[in-house]
Each structure stands twice: as structure tokens, then as C-alpha cells.
């Protein structure tokens, strides 16, 4: 399996622009997670899905952030409008179960908002 | 909610043994995971402890004491490539039930 695939790997945009990050989980994994990593706040859970249904979005910072999972092989995280404080590495991860504590992370999307 | 504490930095020499501690507070506890992350890379899973005791996987071992809300990652025969950040993470059954990560311990292995 190719692992979790994220795109784009790097994104530089200007404040106010819309940003869409994409993720393809490992085939057969029922759980998909979006995490954000910054020096100040570490690795934070934003939202996770189970069987394409959002289970917990309490980590989503505000209404500017939205996430969707239209099918089992694709998810998006959208920021509109983007702000400089959104600059971070956004990781997507998937797993087949919550029982083993093992998540498979993608390589991340590094977002810079100017 | 949950909170995890781990040292911010640890330095050790090649060939040595190092222990990275993690204490946690959580309302309900399923297990403790450990992840490794090299600079610019993604977190990768190392181990998971749901029960008390020591789990060994090659040069890495992980320990859990549920009664003390404490665990550690033990790295033996350190190699330069072990220089990375190490995160503990808890899964609990209140609220979110997904992994919450500690702030990470940066391990620097010196020759």
C-alpha cells in the first residue's frame, strides 16, 4: 500500500485566500484524522471521521475551518479565509481501529500564510 | 480533558541507554502510545501499552504503570539516527476517544 497520501506538500498563500488540503487514507482504514502541528501548540487533533462520518470536530479552531469526507478514499480540509496564524504543518492520518493506538500519518502539508 | 507531561529535551551519547518519561492525567484511560518524528517528517508509531508492564520491540521498549499514570520509552544501544522527537499519546474514552499527543521530547544523540 502507498500509505496515506496528502497534497499539496507545500502551500504558500496570502492572507484571505482559500486553502484546500487533500488526503487519501490507506485503503480499508475506517478512521481518518486531521492534525495540525506548530511549535507553540504541538500536535493538535482538529477532527476525525469514522466511516466517512465526522465524530469529533471540537478541535476545529473556528468557522473558517471545514472538513469533509465524501467517500472512503478522500478527505479535504478547507480554510477560508486563511490567516497568518493558520501557518502550520497539517497531517492526515488513518487507522483501521482505535484499539491499538496506532495511526498511520501522511507526510503532511506545510502551509504558510503571508 | 487530558494532559501529558514529558521532558522537552534529552541528550545522550551513541551506544548509551536513554529513558523518556511521560506522565498523564485523563478522565478515562485506554492506553499509551509512543511515536517518533524526525525533523521534517511525519510521526511514526513505535509502541502501544494498554496493560501494565514492559513491551519490547528490538532496541526500543515501552513501560506502563496505570496506577501511577506513568509510562516511559527506553531506547538502548543509541544510534545517531535515533536523534528525533518522541511523543507520548493517550487514548481515553471520555469525550473525544482519539489520540491526544504530548508536547514531545527532543532526543539528541551525540557521537
Image: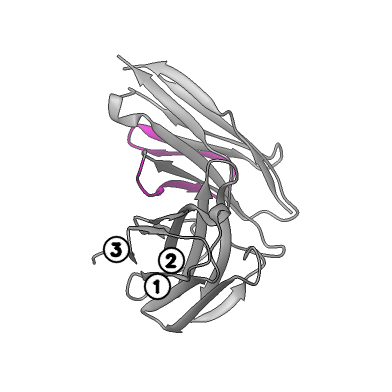
Residue located beneath label 1 in the image:
A29
CA distance separating discs 3 and 2: 11 Å
Q: Where does label 3 land, which residue?
A: A3
Q: Which residue is mark 2?
A: A95
Residue A29 visible in the current orientation: yes
The answer to whether the residue labelled 2 contacts the one labelled 1, judged by CB atoms less than 8 Å apart, is yes
In which quarter of the view is residue A74 placed? bottom left
**Would residue A37 appear left or right of A23 to someone viewing this image?**
right
Between B17 and B10, the residue placed more toward the observer is B10
- Residue drawn at (56%, 29%) of the image: B8
Image: A26 above or below A74: above
The answer to whether mark 3 and mark 2 are in CB contact below 8 A is no
Q: Is residue A60 above or below residue B82?
A: below
Position of residue B53 measured from the top left corner of the image (x, y, whole percent): 55, 39
Q: Is residue A41 left or right of residue A102?
A: right
B41 part of magenta stretch: yes
Q: Nearer the viewer, mark 1 or mark 3?
A: 3
Circles 1, 3 touching at the beta carbon (< 8 Å): no
The coloring applied to the image is: one colour
Does label 2 or label 1 sit earlier along the sequence? 1
Q: Are marks 3 and 2 on the same chain?
A: yes
Dot 3 or dot 2, earlier in sequence: 3
Residue B31, image x, y percentages? 58, 51
Residue A80 in picture, x, y percent from top left: 54, 71
User: Which residue: 57% across, 77% down?
Assistant: A54
Count of marks overlaid on the render: 3
Q: Secondary structure at mark 1?
A: loop
Q: Magenta segment range? A: B40-60
Amino acid at each position: 500500500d502507498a500509505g496515506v497520501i496528502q497534497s499539496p506538500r507545500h502551500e504558500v498563500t496570502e492572507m484571505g485566500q482559500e486553502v484546500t488540503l487533500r488526503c487519501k487514507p490507506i485503503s480499508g482504514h475506517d478512521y481518518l484524522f486531521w492534525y495540525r502541528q506548530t511549535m507553540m501548540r504541538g500536535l493538535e487533533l482538529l477532527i476525525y471521521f469514522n466511516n466517512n462520518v465526522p465524530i469529533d470536530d471540537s478541535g476545529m479552531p473556528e468557522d473558517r475551518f471545514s472538513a469533509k469526507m465524501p467517500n472512503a478514499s478522500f478527505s479535504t480540509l478547507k480554510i477560508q479565509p486563511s490567516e497568518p496564524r493558520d501557518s502550520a504543518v497539517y497531517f492526515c492520518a488513518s487507522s483501521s481501529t482505535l484499539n491499538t493506538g496506532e495511526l498511520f500519518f501522511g507526510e503532511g502539508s506545510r502551509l504558510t500564510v503571508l | 480533558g487530558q494532559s501529558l507531561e514529558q521532558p522537552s529535551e534529552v541528550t545522550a551519547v551513541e551506544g548509551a541507554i536513554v529513558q523518556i518519561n511521560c506522565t498523564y492525567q485523563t478522565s478515562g484511560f485506554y492506553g499509551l502510545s509512543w511515536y517518533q518524528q524526525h525533523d521534517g517528517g511525519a510521526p511514526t508509531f513505535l509502541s502501544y501499552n494498554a496493560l501494565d508492564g514492559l513491551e519490547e520491540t528490538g532496541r526500543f521498549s515501552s513501560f506502563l504503570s496505570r496506577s501511577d499514570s506513568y509510562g516511559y520509552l527506553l531506547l538502548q544501544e543509541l544510534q545517531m539516527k535515533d536523534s528525533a522527537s518522541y511523543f507520548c499519546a493517550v487514548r481515553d474514552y471520555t469525550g473525544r476517544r482519539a489520540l491526544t499527543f504530548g508536547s514531545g521530547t527532543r532526543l539528541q544523540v551525540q557521537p
